[in-house]
Amino acid sequence: MPDIIFQSTKHFWPEITLALTFIAAMIFEFATKKRTTGTGILVLLGLAAALVQLPSAPSEPVSIFGGMYAIDPFSTFFKYVIIVTGMVVVLFSFQSQELKKESGHTGEYYCFIAAVTFGMVLMTGSSNLVMIYLSIELVSITSYILAGFSKSLRRSSEAALKYVIFGALSSGIMLYGMSLIFGLTGTLDLSGIRTALASGHAVTTGWSFAALMAAIVLMLAGFGYKVSVVPFHFWTPDVYEGAPITITAFLAVASKAAVFAVMIRFFYVAFFDNMLASTGVYSSFRNVDWSMILAVLSVLTMTLGNFVAIWQDNLKRMLAYSSIAHAGYMLMGVVVMSNFGLSAIMLYFVMYFFMNLGAFYVVMVIADKIGSENIDDYRGFGKRAPIISVGLSIFLISLTGLPPTAGFVGKLFLFSSVMASQFIWLAIVGVLNSVVSLYYYARVLKNMYLREAPDGDESPIVFSKVTSAVVILFIIPNILLCFFYQPVLTFAQRSIAILLPGL
């Protein structure tokens, strides 16, 4: 046993670094009790140290801690997205006026950022149902705290309460699904589940098959809650609106990346029958058609997210429904059951990182300046704050999926992968939903450029040079990745190509 732990630990250093960062940040906070950004800087350095250690991960899949955890290029890709998002959110937090009002607790805030990042990283490599549940719960509990961090705001406390209630329900549902799978297969290991299903003894009778499908639906409900899939999305608008903007951005990007990573691993490792190596196309077990279930959820998610977003007056809440719609787009890549589809999801996450974090950053700095997130209060911003307005315009255009932005390339590959797998109808629904999204994004642009400022006030709104520089830094990749996306796509393709053979 000691040899197994020692051999496993040498592959586990990025995760150990994150855990030590959380512990060190807690000790530092309790020891100093100073209302400074020292804890945040310590967490930022810890995240950077973990990021630096990621390239040392093995190029071939390695199963550690007795098959509980997998180290492979697939998980490494998502770890990059999650850790970099955590670093960016910490940097945003240094500038957030909303958090400065909670000056007595900001150190604890940064500690929980480290903890939730650690949990998300664990999710990407979890290859055992127990490990999946523990990592999801670590993320959930810390997310509940962060969502309700703004104690002075009633909406923040309400958001945290709703998050806890829905989260407890989804955890119970997922646990029941896991218990059914264990009862049918006799194992909690994902590769062991596949072996049991391949032998056929888990689905020999009608009742066994019904129980298996029920387990899949229950697991989907648990995953769907975390990624805001309809009909498990009810918590999202209220939590996104009530939580600090920095946490909203973190949940919208990093949380989705972690859940998609564990969901892909769960379905493609446990429920695939075979893979045609020459084409990279997967085949699920006979009669276990989870892809059609996901296709229906994808359509419902993107459609409801886009149509309800039309009626929102609060930009933060509108972006919450937009985030729901984007979860629907990403689900299309899971549906197609091919390496092409999975690499398209991974490419899309990189594009989504830049356009979504950029949009939330602009919303944060404007809210700090004018004290409002209402879309009508953005009237005349095009003249009063040109750099910030151009930045928000590009981010929203990218979220729509129009050229020449990164979002266009992301959606192009997603829709192409769906078309290549003969899900023509699903691709058509995705395109139509993108057209719908243009309407509510254009509403923001209309207010900024075509409507007069409130009370006719056209005086300039001055933002710091740091704020303008950050906006420009997010604009650049949103444009460049439309033309120079190949390195990211190649990295994604290499990461997904050996997901299954090593498990």
Image (spheres, rainbow, N blue to C red):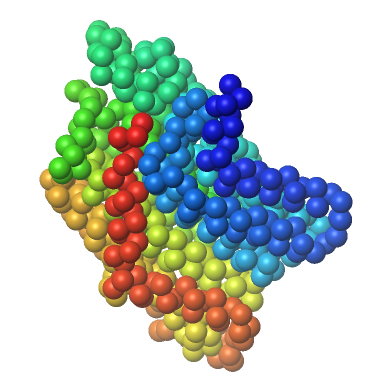
Seen at 55% across and 57% down, the residue is 52
Which quadrant would residue 178 be assigned to in this image? top left
Q: Is residue 52 above or below residue 196?
A: below
Q: Position of residue 50 (x, y in %)?
A: 58, 52
Which quadrant would residue 206 be assigned to in this image? top left
Which quadrant would residue 365 be assigned to in this image? bottom right
Q: How many marks?
A: 0
Q: Position of residue 352 (x, y in %)?
A: 40, 60
Q: Position of residue 284 (x, y in %)?
A: 23, 29
Q: Is residue 334 above or below residue 458?
A: above
Nearest the viewer among 369 and 503 is 503
Q: Is residue 113 above or below residue 72?
A: below
Q: Is residue 449 left or right of residue 463?
A: left
Q: Is residue 405 left or right of residue 429?
A: right
Q: Is residue 97 visible?
A: yes
Seen at 23% across and 27% down, the residue is 273
Nearest the viewer among 40 and 365 is 40
Seen at 33% across and 64% down, the residue is 487
Q: Position of residue 467 (x, y in %)?
A: 59, 78
Q: Quadrant of the N terminus?
A: top right
Q: Quadrant of the C terminus?
A: top left
Residue found at the far front of this picture:
3
Nearest the viewer among 127 and 154 is 127
Q: Is residue 257 visible?
A: no
